Amino acid sequence: MWFFPKIIAHRGGGKLAPENTLAAVRCGLAHGFHAVEFDVMLSSDSIPVLMHDPQFGRTVPGKGAVNEASARQLAAMDAGSWFGPQFAGEPVPSFEDVATFCKSNGIWMNIEIKPVPGFEVETGRFVAELTRRLFAEEVATGMPKGNAAALPLFSSFSFEALVAAKTAAPEIPRGYLVDRIPADWREKLRALDAIALHTNHKNLTPEYARAIRQAGFGLFCYTVNTPERAREIFQWGVDAFCTDRIDLIGADFAVD
Ligand code: G3P
Ligand code: MG
């Protein structure tokens, strides 16, 4: 089952703003997106921050491992200039700041837990504990099924990180994220008590889509960047996808 939005801005604002920054989430919102995906890893002082790559160099100038910098150091770095001068000085944001912004602006979150190798359990646990604190009221109220969208959704390529998230915040739903669908997808989803499979749309087939839906799981695809492909996978029964082309595929995109 899928209780969440269907069209999600990838890494905040897709290709229109520097990924995994607050500016990106604002950009998505300005384009009408009230649903966002972003990547979260831990700083050296175990603070969850938005970041995709484990190494500096692509979105933040420099060399070395991101998880050897503290959250304070990361907040002073420039995660915007690589994208364009108008974003110069845009910091690496803390997950807490972004989640707070999302909550206060009614933006639903797909929180992708992105551990640096070796930090799977710690990352899953810290991200889940913080999320649970931020959503304490919603967790305590016990969301009725129809209103599950009041809670965010964790996803991760790391099974271990999701197990840790489940232990720390069992009430926050989980999706298992894979590039290629493994033979044991049912067992993995059941072990995680996950609500959905998240997969690369390039490796999905209509047969897999049918089987996953029939097994009672939601089905999410990344990263769908043409309306034609979006229409095709929706016809296969895909529930939702994230996109980099928030300029081409609107938040209200639907198969007519
Ligand atoms: O969560 C979907 C998608 O973001 C997974 O791939 O590398 O863009 O984080 P990546
Ligand atoms: Mg991601």
Image: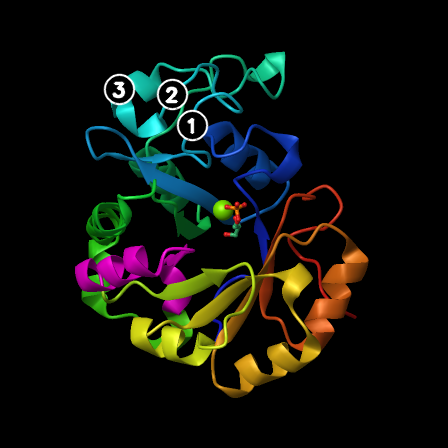
Quarter occupied by the C terminus: bottom right
Horizontally, residue 63 falls left or right of residue 228, namely left
Q: Earlier in the sequence, mark 1 or mark 3?
A: 1
Vertically, is 199 above or below 192?
above
Where residue 220 sits, quadrant-wise, is bottom right
Q: How far from the left and from the top, in percent, is residue 84?
A: 63, 17
* Nearer to us in this view, 173 or 205: 205
Q: Which residue is mark 1?
A: 55
* Nearer to us in this view, 183 or 249: 183
Q: What's the mark number on residue 116?
A: none
Label 2, residues with CA under 10 Å away: few <14, some 14-19, many ≥20: few
Q: Secondary structure at mark 2?
A: loop
Q: Secondary structure at mark 3?
A: helix
Q: What's the mark number on residue 64?
A: 2
Q: Residue at x 46, y 75 (%)?
A: 185
Q: How far from the left and from the top, in percent, is residue 17?
A: 60, 29
* Nearer to us in this view, 184 or 28: 184
Q: Residue at x 21, y 35 (%)?
A: 46
Q: Is residue 5 magenta?
A: no
Vertically, is 146 above or below 45?
below
Where residue 156 sits, quadrant-wise, is bottom left
Q: Residue at x 38, y 73 (%)?
A: 188
Residue bounds of the magenta highlight: 148-169
Count of numbered marks: 3
